[in-house]
Image (tube, rainbow, N blue to C red):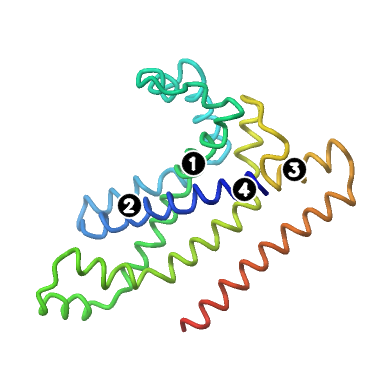
Amino acid sequence: YENMLYFTLLWLPLMLILSILIALFLDSRRGKIGALGKVVVFLPYGVPTVIGTLMWGYMFTPGGVVHDLLVFFGLPSNILAPQYILYAMLLIIVWEWTGYNTVILLAGLGSIPSPLYEAAKIDGASSWQVTRFIKLPMLRKYLVFISMLTIIGDQLLFNEPFILSNLSSVSFGFTPNLYVYHVTYFLEEFNYSSAVAFVLILVSLIVAVIGIRYFRSES
């Protein structure tokens, strides 16, 4: 859980900030530009996890785009090394899920009643004031929903580290789900793996219950 805790502390705020900024930008753009932007942003989520992870994995290897860019800027280029693999994973996950969360926030922005905007316009509110006092507060429940899904998803993260393990030395304990897989199929400690899996389910259930109670209190 140490890796996942650190990963969540990096992933959650970064993804929320990116999703909010992109959603606010696309919401302010109407017509073909806004529609095309939504498609482009959502496209990474439509790429199968295996294909997307392999694509990024090979871009991290020598000769890949990301590797060469890191070399060009004088940064550590071996991003698949054990000490950097978490950041490689972070980049892949943010690329995969930011568009999905952006669409959720766009739906939230689209549900804001137009009279609020009209009242703000009459009061002479600036674009920043509309964003700060209308849009962001109205997005709060959507941000809570995204955070809940992210925390639960952290517990179940498996495909990306498993695929990258073919290109790098990913520890079997990198994520709880990967650890359960290793203990079950390699160590064949079925009782222990079942106990760990039960803890994962319990943590996810607690997070879900907290989220449900929040939404009920809001309604």
Q: Residues within 10 Å of mark 2 (few under 14, many from 20)?
A: many
Q: Is label 1 in a helix, a strand or a loop?
A: loop
In the image, 172: left or right of 154? Answer: right
Disc 2 and disc 3 in contact, CB within 8 angstroms: no
Mark 3: amino acid:
Tyr
Instruction: Choose the circle earlier in sequence order: 3 or 1.
Output: 1
The residue where tag 1 is placed is 47
In the image, 3: left or right of 105? Answer: right
Residue 40 percent across, percent down from the top left:
34, 45
Disc 3 and disc 4 in contact, CB within 8 angstroms: no
The residue where tag 3 is placed is 179
Q: Is label 3 in a helix, a strand or a loop?
A: helix
Instruction: Choose the circle earlier in sequence order: 2 or 1.
Output: 2
93 versus 28 height, above or below: above
The residue sitting at 37% across, 50% down in the picture is 18
Residue 186 percent across, percent down from the top left:
84, 35
In the image, 31: left or right of 197? Answer: left
The residue where tag 2 is placed is 38
The residue where tag 4 is placed is 4
167 versus 141 height, above or below: above
Q: Is label 4 in a helix, a strand or a loop?
A: helix
Front residue of 102 and 85: 85
Instruction: Choose the circle earlier in sequence order: 1 or 4.
Output: 4
Q: Residues within 10 Å of mark 3 (few under 14, many from 20)?
A: some
Mark 4: amino acid:
Met
Q: Residues within 10 Å of mark 4 (few under 14, many from 20)?
A: some
